[in-house]
Image (tube, grey):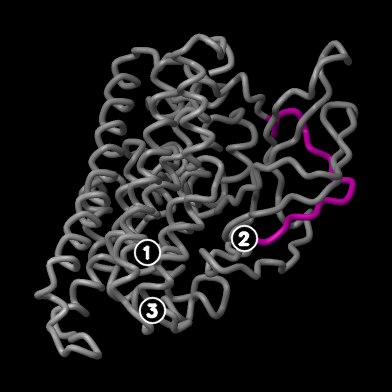
Amino acid sequence: MEAAANASSNAGAVTAESIVAQARTMMPRLRERAQRTEERRRIPAETHHEFIESGFYRILQPARYGGFELDYGTQTEMSVELAMGCASSGWIASITACHAWIAGMFPPAVQERIWGDDAGTLIASAFQPPGDYRIERATGGWRVAGRWKFSSGVELCQWAVIATPIPAADGKGPPERQFALVPLDEAAIEDVWFVSGLAGTGSNDIVLRDVFIPDAHTLKASECAGGPTPGSAINPCHIYRLPLFGVFPYNLVGVGIGAAIGAVELVIEQLKVRSTATMHLRMAALQSAQLRIARAAASADAARVLIRTNCVEMNARARAGLPLGPEHRVRYRRDAGFASLLFLEAVQGVFPLLGGGGLAAGNPIQRQWRDAHAVGQHIACSWDAAGSHYGAAVLGVLPPEQM
């Protein structure tokens, strides 16, 4: 605990505003590294070091273990600023920070094992259950084997939280949703991340071969659905009582918003000095270009305001001990999906203004376009999933317990 206590000594000086300001200052450097980040398929060492030095990974980490326990959504605003320069870097900063938040809901014993001697320990995730896996009950825990995909930044981390569906208690129903924290020195990491969007996130596979997971390292989905969690007994901050699934998209959607804002800003700078190839007209003087810029900027800004407003509300309610009921959760997810529509509209709207130059593989605006679409592909940001879920809920097709 001594390391954690020392690490938390400066926590009082860190605020959400200071974190976002640091991210804004860092953005130009990330933009300069964005091409290299994409080519390496992971963030550069200097970016990772700057994230550590700036405390980005600790913003949602329990204060008991050297974290800052800032309001939920600080990571969202931070990722908007970072993703204006490099969406992959913004994704790694936000998603790694949120894993400490999730770990803060787990039983105290595993938190002590993770952070007791090193408050700088980082956690990855792999939430999609593998298609081929084995989970068997053992004395005091579970024996697990399988391949978990899409673990962003896993090579930077020492632990991972993974989805481990367990058999229903009655042996007849569908598997029960459960998460487990596993040390990555008991896993193999396979380099398989070759993609067109968010290429610099290093979202590789975690492979477990007959690993024992103690019960104290597990958390059932029903235990983090809003209200007290096993971890909130030692971490009284309101963020560890938020409904995990109801607010999880806010760890991701800011990256798409930032990518869109960054793309619009870059297009504006280009159009100020460009002329059409055939008629030699200033692009900035074309009303069609002006309208595309205006709509794209308004769409991206509207997405940011919508998400920011919801974050203020969810923190205020949780801090006051008010429940975030099913009606709040489906609305928060709906709005994350709608924000995705808005940031995708923004990048789609300005992309035609690039002409043939937009086809170049190294064009930074094209990268932002691809990265924004990659964010929109995530199920947590999918309008089809979130919108239909909300519609079914308000029309009475979806029971409250399934919201």
What is the distance, in whole Å, between disc 1 and disc 3 at their CAs? 35 Å
Q: Amino acid at mark 2?
A: Ser
Q: Nearer the viewer, mark 1 or mark 3?
A: 3
Residue at (44% x, 14% y) in the render: 394
Residue at (55% x, 12% y) in the render: 397
What is the distance, in whole Å, between disc 1 and disc 2 at their CAs? 23 Å
Q: Which circle's residue, 1 or 2, is located before the other in the chain?
A: 1
Left or right of residue 301, residue 56 in this image: right
Q: Determine whether label 1 and label 2 are within 8 Å by CB.
A: no
Name the residue that disc number 2 marks.
203
Residue at (38% x, 55% y) in the render: 56
Magenta segment, which residues? 203-218
Q: Determine whether label 3 and label 2 are within 8 Å by CB.
A: no
SS at mark 2 in the image: loop
Mark 1, other Cα within 10 Å: few <14 / some 14–19 / many ≥20 = few
SS at mark 1 in the image: helix
Q: Which circle's residue, 3 or 2, is located before the other in the chain?
A: 2
Mark 3, other Cα within 10 Å: few <14 / some 14–19 / many ≥20 = some
User: Which quadrant would residue 189 be assigned to in this image?
Assistant: bottom right
Name the residue that disc number 1 marks.
53
Q: Which circle's residue, 1 or 3, is located before the other in the chain?
A: 1
SS at mark 3 in the image: helix
| Residue 354 position within the rendered picture, expressed as x and y whole percent measured from the top left | 31, 77
| Residue 8 position within the rendered picture, expressed as x and y whole percent measured from the top left | 37, 46
- The answer to whether 183 is drawn above or below residue 134 in the figure is below
Name the residue that disc number 3 marks.
358
* Magenta span includes 223: no
Q: Determine whether label 1 and label 3 are within 8 Å by CB.
A: no
Q: Amino acid at mark 1?
A: Glu
What is the distance, in whole Å, between disc 3 and disc 2 at their CAs? 26 Å
| Residue 126 position within the rendered picture, expressed as x and y whole percent measured from the top left | 66, 47
The majority secondary structure of the magenta stretch comes to strand
